[in-house]
Amino acid sequence: MPEASPTLYLLAGALLFAIGFHSLLVQPHVLRRVMALNVMGVGVFLLFAALAARTRGETPDPVPHAMVLTGIVVSVCATGLALALAHRLEAAEEEEREDESAGDGRQARAEHEETDR
Amino acid sequence: MSLTWAMALLVLAPLAAAALSFALPAIGRWLALATVAAVGSAVVRVAELVLGGGVQVHRVGGWSAPLGINLRADGLAVLMLAITAIVGGVVTLYTPAYLAANRSSPGQRQRFWSPFLLLWTALDALFLSSDIFNLYVTLELLALAAVTLVALVGKRPALEAAMRYLFVSLAASLLYLLGVGLVYGQYATLDLALLAERSATGGPTLWVAASVMSGGLLAKAALFPMHFWLPPAHANAPAPVSALLSSLVVKGSFYILLRLWFEGFSGLMTPAAAQLFGALGAAAILWGSLNALLAPRLKRLVAYSTVAQLGYLFLLVPLAAGPGDGFTAWSGGLIFLGAHACAKAAMFLSAGNMLHAAGNDRIRDLDGVTHVLPLSAFSFGLSGMSLVGLPPSGGFAGKWLLLRAAIARGQWWWVATLLVGSLLAAAYVIRVLLHAFTRVEAPARHRPVPRVMEWTALGLAALAAGLGFAASGSATLLRVGAPWPPAGVGRG
């Protein structure tokens, strides 16, 4: 199988980053935005791997690989926190809806709007 | 205490306490107090070493720079570590009373300590890092801990603010990481000092890398126009968390920006780039102050004041960059940073006290609050004095040095910005005080505020108000490792 040049991976990484960034800005749904962040992350990691292949002739440079590994750990933690937060947020929204249908909705909404200002 | 021990304690003490308080939440408060003692003595030791022997470097595990991780402490790092220890210590004393007074459940009371101590770990590690990848890791740790603290209340506005904060933060970190990759691809090093040597000539790749990294950091430092996430996040968090976020967390990103533009990428610092930073800072001062003047609620006002005060920090850049003496503006900006950290934390804590007493923080409902909370109203005024820049506060010393630098360089437009900003700050501080000092026939019913909450806020406010006396000492400290030779002629 012919080897693709590192430049191809470099461009693919940049493209993935751009796609992820775009989705993060335009997608309204929390889960999609979490995924968009992950796509951005993958783009950066691909770029690191491509740079490792490009900078050091025969054997690829190990430092970018070590950075990608660290980066993956960080991104797993961040995704976990984002999902936990999304879960809590959904529960809080649901609770508010229930309160509203229970009757004191107007008051709850007014309070919420006030704290939001 | 040797250097190795002192530097290890600065990072490992809060980290160990964070892990322990996660496992044993009931003793979180005592673990935090132990951390204050350990980190406090370590900061004093590192400060002695830096003042006596210049910049201190510790190679972790005996591995040197390209492979290993270097911890590096110069005057600037020591100043930041000291501010963190002071604010962290005060928050440690304030929070137990705050949580108890707000009738938080035992679970809520205990959940505060682990993310708080992690935040402290991340800050200490950040200030000691000397390579751009390590800075990325600490920046992420800092963001994750900060988001967790914002979400702690568990109510919907706080959760929404935390979510938005998390998205902005993560996207910004990835932008920064992208730049780190480009820099490494070009120069095969991550070390700031080596980068400064290798990147002296600049080039298009370095410009792209510096732009994406700075873009990410500016968003995290909430510089206008990337400040939109800050007021909701800082205003919806509990008072001690707001204090930490406004006084310390945003400064972490500012610190990295300084390290990049004055050390790693100093070859890129053109007059145009420097003026751009200053212009964004000036816009932040005006926009933040105007919004603070119009804010209906006290915590919102204090949060917008942070947006404005962060602008002052960026005035440092055009006044310190380029040929000639940059140290006046450098030390001015950083003394201002220290003063703002103390004053803003004190302000959020005293605002928290008033909010607790009155039950809400609408500014028009603060009438007569001095009757019930004279100490908190006084702390608010004292910290406001530093924000406005009245002598002998730290805010005055910082602004004075910045003014002197602006006049010496003939850049009168920054003089005008500094003066207008001070007037606006005076206006929004006085607006609160007018309400607080209004005489009322029958003061509304207020909840009692534990004494420790009032005294801790007052102590911090008094520190900010008197910090001007420590200005020359701070300047001596900042001189160690500053990017200017002691004589102040040209740049090395």
Image (tube, rainbow, N blue to C red):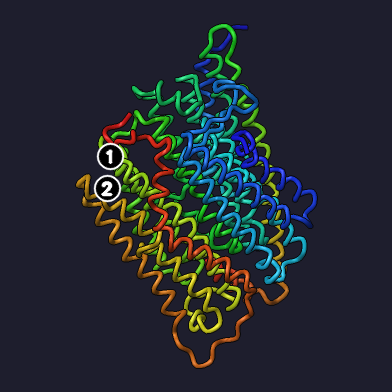
| Residue B77: % across, % down | 49, 41
- Residues tagged 2 and 1 counted as in contact (Cβ below 8 A): yes
Examine the image and state in which quarter residue B276 appears.
top left
Q: At 45% across and 82% down in the image, what residue appears?
A: B437
Q: Residue at x 52, y 19 (%)?
A: A51
Q: Secondary structure at mark 1?
A: loop
Left or right: B284, with A49 as reference point:
left
The correct choice, above or below, for B437 with respect to B274 in the image is below
Residue situated in front as seen by the camera: B274 or B66: B66
Q: Earlier in the sequence, mark 2 or mark 1?
A: 1
Amino acid of disc 1? Asp
Residue B229, compared with residue B259, is above or below; it is below
Chain ID for label 1? B
- The spot of residue B95 in percent (x, y) is 65, 63
Task: Give residue B277's position: percent from left, percent from top.
Answer: 34, 44
Q: Are marks 2 and 1 on the same chain?
A: yes
**Residue located beneath label 2 in the image:** B405
Q: The residue tagged with tag 2: helix, strand or loop?
A: helix
Q: Position of residue B326 (x, y in %)?
A: 31, 40
Mark 1 neighbour density, 10 Å: few (under 14) some (14–19) many (20 or more): many
Q: Which residue is mark 1?
A: B325
Distance, label 2 to label 1, CA atoms, is 8 Å
Which quadrant holds the C terminus of chain B? top left
Amino acid residing under circle 2: Ala
> Relative to residue B104, is residue A106 drawn left or right?
left
Q: Is residue B355 above or below residue B236?
A: below
For this orientation, the residue located farthest to the bottom is: B441
Residue nearer the viewer, B216 or B310: B310
Left or right: B104 as drawn, with respect to B347: right
Q: Quadrant of the N terminus of chain B?
A: top right
